Amino acid sequence: MNNKIILLVEDNPDDEELTLMALEKNNILNEVVVARDGEEALEFLFGDSPGSSIKRKTLPAIILLDLKLPKVNGLEVLQKIRSHERTRMLPVVILTSSKEDKDLIESYSLGCNSYVRKPVNFEMFVEATRQLGLYWLLLNEAPPDPSLIL
């Protein structure tokens, strides 16, 4: 399980730390790449900032995506992920504090795989993270990277 990369897109340092602690507490030892805004997330996935020479060979196994992000919001990131053939089938879990129904509806309309509201209680957050890790990194069988299909 630990050779699969997790892309955590989170601008709040406290929520980032909480997520990383919850993953560690659940023995989810995968490499976690943190993008602190939507632009960084898109750069990681596509290498499309001006002058970038990055062409990502290995895509993450899962993206944990916050919605309220600086520069490029989470819904725009999700829309871009779904609009590219290579990334359109990547599992994207919205992990947010938003309680707005419009965010929930828009996230599913744009193709998120799951929508999880961050629990306020740490133990509940740890348990939610454990379940996410078990399902998305161990049980779920993800589609192959389209660039690897002959």
Image (spheres, rainbow, N blue to C red):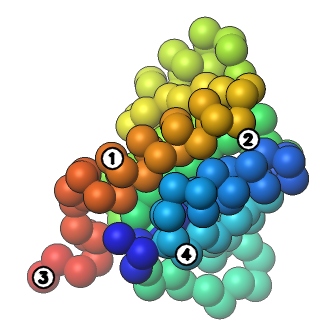
For badge 1, the amino acid type reads Tyr
15 shown above or below 137: above
Sequence order check, earlier mark of 4 and 3? 4
Is 119 on the left or on the right of 64, as rendered? right
Residue 31: numbered disc: 4
Q: CA distance from mark 2 to mark 1?
A: 26 Å
- Residue in the image at 52% along x and 36% along y: 128
Q: Where does the N terminus fall, quadrant-wise?
A: bottom left
| Residue 150 disc label | 3
Residue 135's label in the rendered image is: 1
Q: How many marks?
A: 4
What kind of element bears circle 1? helix
Amino acid tagged 3: Leu
Which numbered disc, 4 or 2, marks the residue closer to the eye? Answer: 4
For the residue marked with disc 2, what is the amino acid?
A: Asn
- Tell me if residue 22 comes above or below residue 52 in the rendering: above
Question: Would you say the residues marked 2 and 1 are in contact, meaning their CB atoms lie under 8 Å apart?
Answer: no
Point out the frontmost of discs 2 and 1.
1
Q: Position of residue 87 (x, y in %)?
A: 41, 60
Whether pointer 4 and pointer 3 mark residues with C-beta atoms closer than 8 Å, the reply is no
Q: Earlier in the sequence, mark 3 or mark 1?
A: 1
Q: Residues within 10 Å of mark 1 (few under 14, many from 20)?
A: few
